[in-house]
Image (cartoon, rainbow, N blue to C red):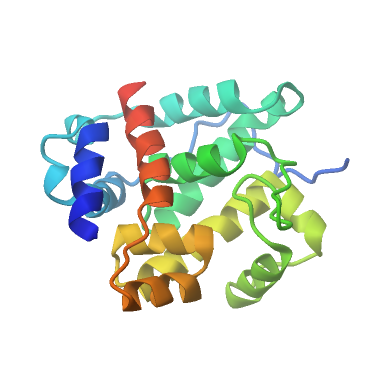
Amino acid sequence: MKTYFLITLSLVTSSISFAKVDPSRSLASIKQNVRVDHARELLGSHYKKSIVSTFEKSKGLEKNILSTVTKRLPTKYKSQAKAVTEAIIKEASSQGLDPYFVMAVISGESSFNPLAIGPVGEIGMMQIRPATGEWMAKKIKFNWKGEKTLRDPVANIKLGTAYLAWLREKFSNQSQLYLAAYNMGPKSVKKAVAKSIWPKDYPIHVMKRYLAFYKSI
């Protein structure tokens, strides 16, 4: 049930083509209104008493995200930390998502490994199946070059955040449902809800990481 999810949440309260980022240029800025609005949506009535609300007017969170990404990326990819950070911030903002939420999904899906392969063929940072990646690339008019597109972390994040945003709209901004759909597919979620079952395991899995990232700031 949705109520159960909120109660539980309160208790938790190889060639890769990377996008080039000028190391001397400052990071893209987080859109604070977007971040806060999405945080309120994710946490609902628990927002005001959550660790997230304490950062409502904070500045400089971009550097914290860069630090987190740098620590989490495998050694051979640490030099690309700024490009990955830029992708997380820019794509989250453009899709109306909190960048810390995007990081939480990445953490849970691949532990920040650009070359991670899932049990049913999911690829990369946000563990996207090639069929889903190709479909989303066409939808957002992004240049699809086959499966190798998903091994590029910047492209993977762009497609993953776009897919999350699509699911968010499909499930009327109900975070428990669109998070579950990211994991088990929208059809499976609809079938579960039709039986009065609200999938909770994956949403809780992601939200634990989301709150942990804020606690580490």
Q: How far across and down, in percent of the image, does residue 125 sit?
A: 63, 44
Residue 160 location, quadrant: bottom right
Q: Is 52 displayed left or right of 187 in the figure?
A: left
Give the vertical position of 200 relative to 81 (above or below): below
| Residue depicted at x 51% and y 44% | 88
Q: Indicate the quadrant containing the N terminus: top left, top right, bottom left or bottom right.
A: bottom left
| Residue depicted at x 64% and y 68% | 132
Residue 149 versus residue 202: which sits nearer the camera? 202
| Residue depicted at x 32% and y 58% | 175
Whether residue 95 can be seen here:
no
Residue 129 versus residue 71: which sits nearer the camera? 129
Give the vertical position of 184 relative to 39 (above or below): below
Q: Is 145 displayed left or right of 85 in the figure?
A: right
Whether residue 85 can be seen here:
yes
Give the vertical position of 38 relative to 187 (above or below): above
| Residue depicted at x 81% and y 64% | 146
